[in-house]
Amino acid sequence: MSPSRPRRNLPPLIALRAFEAVGTSGSIRAAAEALSVSPTVVSRHLANLEQRLSARLVEPKGRSVALTDAGARFHAEIAKAFDLIDQATEKLTRPRKAPLRLWCSPGIAVMRLLPRLPELEARLPDFSIHFHPTLAAPDWKRGEADAEIFYAPTERPARDGIVEAELARPRVMPVASPSLVGRLHRRADEIELLYEAPWVHELSGDEWRSFMHTAGLKIDARAEQRLEGGVRLWHAHLAIGAAELGQGVALANEFLVEEQLASGRLVEIGQTDVRLGTYGLALPSGAGEAASSQALRDWLGEALRPTSRHVQKTHESFAN
């Protein structure tokens, strides 16, 4: 048999609670309001506590009270205990939500998905959404992500334990500000404008080179100069922002510039139908059948559906 624990020398908890409230608020009346009792009840608890401890804890101060030196020391210690009780109660009673760690390429995250996050939260009320825009790939073995929304310019090799599904294959187009088009005295539908305007890059000139090749456009000395020059902005939304500012022509997929094209802040240069990559959803094997995964897929399907008239008309024109 284990030895019995010594009996604790604890004053009545209700009296301690009243004293803690008085010490925190500096007023018997305020403490009474906080505890939903009368000032008389608080005063009685204080008197009982002082008698139990054989110590003076409070003293009159004008129309209120103040802690004595002994009372201040005692209050500082018991306040810590009440804080611990409060924290333990919160941990026990607050709703427990499982995290849904969602990694996503920055461009689509900022331009398309971030405004729609409340919709995902509403669909998954039992989950806490952890949204992580990044160019890096998660370490699945370490459990860094529960789902990944990626953009792959080429087909990726299969990964052990990971299932990938295509979400959309958007059209990629050169875009520029109307002011830039006006300065060059060209119409936006003239592809020749590409050879006269500066190009804005994300990581390198590789995407521009792929676009020119796929669109059947010649890469002459002017194009080579633009492929080698220009600033590298690293993220799609920064390149699009530079194009809006009139700094050059940027390559963007239709999901990232839908709003800017609809509002006229950007215009498409030329008329091409080039698709260089795919948005996909990666999930751990076995997670695809979960209700949360289906809700995520439904949300992504709606988020990546064309909504502006510009994009819808473009889809229709290429379909005909």
Image: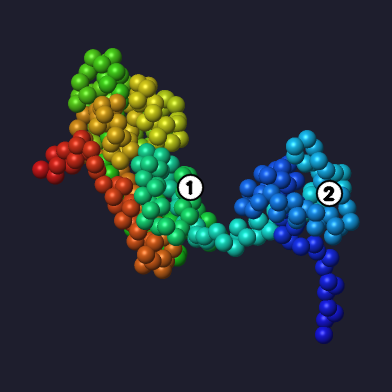
* Whole-percent x, y for residue 37 in the image: 64, 53
Residue extending farthest left:
320
Residue located beneath label 1 in the image: 132
- Quadrant where the C terminus is found in the figure: top left
Q: Decide: few, some or many residues near mark 1? Use Cα within 10 Å; few <14, some 14-19, many ≥20.
A: some
For image coordinates 30% across by 43% down, the residue present is 276
- Quadrant where the N terminus is found in the figure: bottom right
* Whole-percent x, y for residue 234 in the image: 45, 35
For image coordinates 14% across by 44% down, the residue present is 319
**Residue 290 vertical placement versus 169 (above, below):** below
Q: In the image, which disc is placed on residue 256?
A: none
Q: Decide: few, some or many residues near mark 2? Use Cα within 10 Å; few <14, some 14-19, many ≥20.
A: many
Q: Secondary structure at mark 1?
A: strand
Q: In the image, which disc is placed on residue 57?
A: 2
Instruction: Pick the residue in front: 113 or 191.
Output: 113
* Whole-percent x, y for residue 139 in the image: 52, 56
Q: Is residue 74 left or right of residue 174?
A: right
* Residue 212 shows in this picture: no
Q: Amino acid type of disc 1?
A: His
Q: Is residue 30 left or right of residue 286?
A: right
**Residue 186 vertical placement versus 17 (above, below):** above
For image coordinates 29% across by 26% down, the residue present is 265
Q: Secondary structure at mark 2?
A: loop
Q: Is residue 211 left or right of residue 156?
A: left
Mark closest to the chain's N terminus, 2 or 1:
2
Residue extending farthest right:
54
Q: In the image, which is nearer the foreground, mark 2 or mark 1?
A: 2
Instruction: Pick the residue in front: 6 or 297.
Output: 6
* Residue 69 shows in this picture: yes
How far apart are labels 2 and 1 at the CA level? 52 Å
